[in-house]
Image (cartoon, coloured by chain):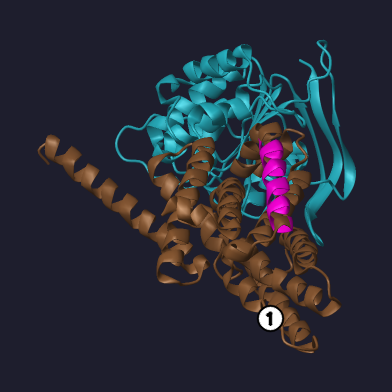
Chain colours: A cyan, B brown
């Protein structure tokens, strides 16, 4: 277990609005963290800080090298609604773009890179979609393509922003299974609005509501629930597969 | 008739200008259309009229001042769009009309009559000068070089710039570079079809190409060919019935668009019939 990223008392936000206050977080290479929290609580802001898309007002973020040397690569799966579905690009080219780092000049993708992209598509089970334009994909397929793009460069850390929106339950199950396997090779950090489901898949849960409540466990504490300002909805009908969360005292 | 036409030097010049306009507009237009920057491009086009007015007033080549004015407006919009205190499309609207206002003010302040002002508004491919042609040639070469060198990065950033940022790619630099190239392409093609019509060369060929291919590179290449056909058809119509070439070029391009649409509809009917639907 080695440390990948460490945030030390980070304050961050946009313009004059401080969204995250005094957030500290350590991510280790075998972590599978689910980030929950109310809308506007700073889930996406936290991801943006880790991804380097916004600079913290105060505090520090540090990446640690592993024994193989520097590998600060982060795989990122953005919310699909940010993507222009009419953009003329094929699945293969989307996945290959995940291999571009820094300001590479002209040239083509090497044979090795193409091989890597094909392997990644096979692994996620969408190799047959390789030559399709993204406009023809369903919501779930689109997510898989973006997941392939995120992991094609074998990052140490995979960050997912609400991967379970716009997809059906079957896909969600498949997705979590893929993530569980990927977690053997990389740390996974996933933002979700769906508290109930993710707590049974992830190893630990963090709750972001301006501050961060994180206890390295997958039990949703009362403190976290209180910060969520909303009881979890539970509707059942007949026999339902379920996970009962233990009572948790501080 | 063709050989008869080619005897005139201005016809040959306008044909060369048509080819060069097709190349630059085919490439940059594909970038504009796929990044949904059509309104932004319209803004830059009209804002550059301010530069033309200033050029007239100060008595030097309006193309140069329009290029400077256009690039500065483009960089300004790109800069403003990253700040959240004003909406991007509002900023474009302001600059659009401000540029036109500056242009009108300076044209009226210029002593005497501005003889070929109309040629900037509606274009006049038949009067392109040798300097215009050399500038357009240089632009086409520049675009081909930039797009071959950085093709993968441009595609990557255009598709998902936030993701590109997480890959340590200089997204802002490329955004500024490309918006400048957009402005330069617009200004240098104003002579061909005019301020009011230049946006069509940047969107119609691409829309036609996009009906047949969904590949970025193919859209670029096909747009060049389609723009070329439109330009030549337009020139011929312009010569035949003696109307401004800018308008006849746009008219030809829109006709090509409708013919393409009709062909696709027929193809679809036939395919459905084969499946007995």
Residue A72 seen in the figure: yes
Q: Quadrant of residue B127?
A: bottom right
Query: Does residue A132 sit above or below A124 in this rendering?
Result: below
Question: Measuring 73% from the left and 46% from the top, which residue is drawn there?
Answer: B138
Question: Measuring 55% from the left and 26% from the top, which residue is drawn there?
Answer: A148
Front one among A113 and B213: B213
Q: Chain of mark 1?
A: B
Q: Quadrant of residue A36?
A: top right
Query: Does residue A216 sit above or below A181 in this rendering?
Result: below
Residue B52 x/y as whole percent: 74, 72
Q: Which residue is denoted by mark 1 in the rendering?
A: B115
Question: Measuring 71% from the left and 69% from the top, which residue is drawn there?
Answer: B48
Question: Measuring 64% from the left and 22% from the top, which residue is drawn there?
Answer: A108
Side of B202 where A63 appears, left or right: right
Query: Does residue A208 sit above or below A116 in this rendering?
Result: below
Residue A12 x/y as whole percent: 81, 50
Residue A202 seen in the figure: no
Side of B78 where B257 appears, left or right: left
Task: Identify the element where label 1 is drawn.
Answer: loop
- Label the magenta part by its dominant secondary structure: helix
Side of A204 where B252 appears, left or right: left
The stretch drawn in magenta includes residue B188: no
- Considering the image in quadrants, where does the C terminus of chain A appear? top right
Residue B209 x/y as whole percent: 44, 45
- Residue interval drawn in magenta: B131-147
Residue A165 x/y as whole percent: 49, 43
Front one among A35 and B231: B231
């Amino acid at each position: 277990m080695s440390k990948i990223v460490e945030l030390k008392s980070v304050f961050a936000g946009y313009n004059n609005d401080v969204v995250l206050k005094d957030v500290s977080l350590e991510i280790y290479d075998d972590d599978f963290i689910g980030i929950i929290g109310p809308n506007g609580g700073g889930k996406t802001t936290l991801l943006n800080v880790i991804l380097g898309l916004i600079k913290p007002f105060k505090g520090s973020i540090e990446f640690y090298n592993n024994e193989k040397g520097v590998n600060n690569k982060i795989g990122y799966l953005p919310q699909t609604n940010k993507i222009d579905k009419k953009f003329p690009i094929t699945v293969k080219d989307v996945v290959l773009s995940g291999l571009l780092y820094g300001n590479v000049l002209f040239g083509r993708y090497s044979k090795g890179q193409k091989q890597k992209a094909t392997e990644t598509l096979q692994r996620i089970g969408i190799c047959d979609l390789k030559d399709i334009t993204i406009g023809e994909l369903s919501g779930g397929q689109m997510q898989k393509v973006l997941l392939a793009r995120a992991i094609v460069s074998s990052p140490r850390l995979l960050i997912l922003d609400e991967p379970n929106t716009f997809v059906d339950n079957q896909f969600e199950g498949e997705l979590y299974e893929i993530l569980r396997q990927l977690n053997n090779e990389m740390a996974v950090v996933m933002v979700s609005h769906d508290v109930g489901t993710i707590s049974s898949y992830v190893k630990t849960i963090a709750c972001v509501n301006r501050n961060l409540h994180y206890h390295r466990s997958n039990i949703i504490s009362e403190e976290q629930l209180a910060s969520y300002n909303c009881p979890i909805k539970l509707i059942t009908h007949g026999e339902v597969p379920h996970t009962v969360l233990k009572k948790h005292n501080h | 008739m063709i050989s008869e036409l080619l005897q005139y030097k201005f016809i040959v010049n306008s044909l060369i200008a048509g080819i060069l306009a097709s190349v630059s507009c085919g490439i940059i237009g594909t970038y504009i259309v796929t990044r949904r920057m059509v309104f932004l491009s319209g803004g830059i086009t009209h804002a550059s009229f301010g530069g033309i007015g200033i050029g007239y007033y100060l008595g030097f080549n309006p193309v140069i001042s329009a290029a400077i004015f256009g690039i500065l407006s483009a960089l300004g919009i790109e800069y403003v769009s990253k700040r959240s205190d004003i909406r991007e499309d509002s900023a474009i609207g302001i600059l659009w009309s401000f540029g036109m206002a500056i242009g009108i003010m300076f044209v009226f302040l210029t002593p005497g009559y501005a003889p070929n002002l109309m040629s900037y508004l509606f274009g006049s491919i038949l009067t392109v000068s040798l300097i215009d042609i050399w500038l357009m040639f240089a632009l086409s070469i520049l675009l081909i070089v930039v797009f071959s060198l950085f093709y993968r990065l441009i595609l990557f950033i255009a598709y998902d710039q936030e993701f590109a940022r997480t890959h340590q790619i200089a997204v802002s630099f490329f955004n500024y570079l490309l918006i400048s190239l957009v402005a330069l392409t617009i200004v240098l093609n104003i002579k061909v079809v005019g301020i009011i019509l230049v946006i069509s060369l940047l969107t119609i060929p691409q829309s036609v190409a996009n009906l047949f291919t969904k590949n970025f590179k193919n859209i670029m290449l096909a747009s060049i060919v389609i723009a070329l056909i439109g330009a030549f058809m337009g020139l011929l119509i312009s010569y035949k019935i003696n109307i401004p070439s800018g308008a006849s070029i746009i008219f030809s391009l829109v006709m090509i668009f409708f013919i393409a649409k009709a062909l696709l509809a027929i193809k679809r009917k036939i395919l459905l019939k084969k499946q007995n639907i």
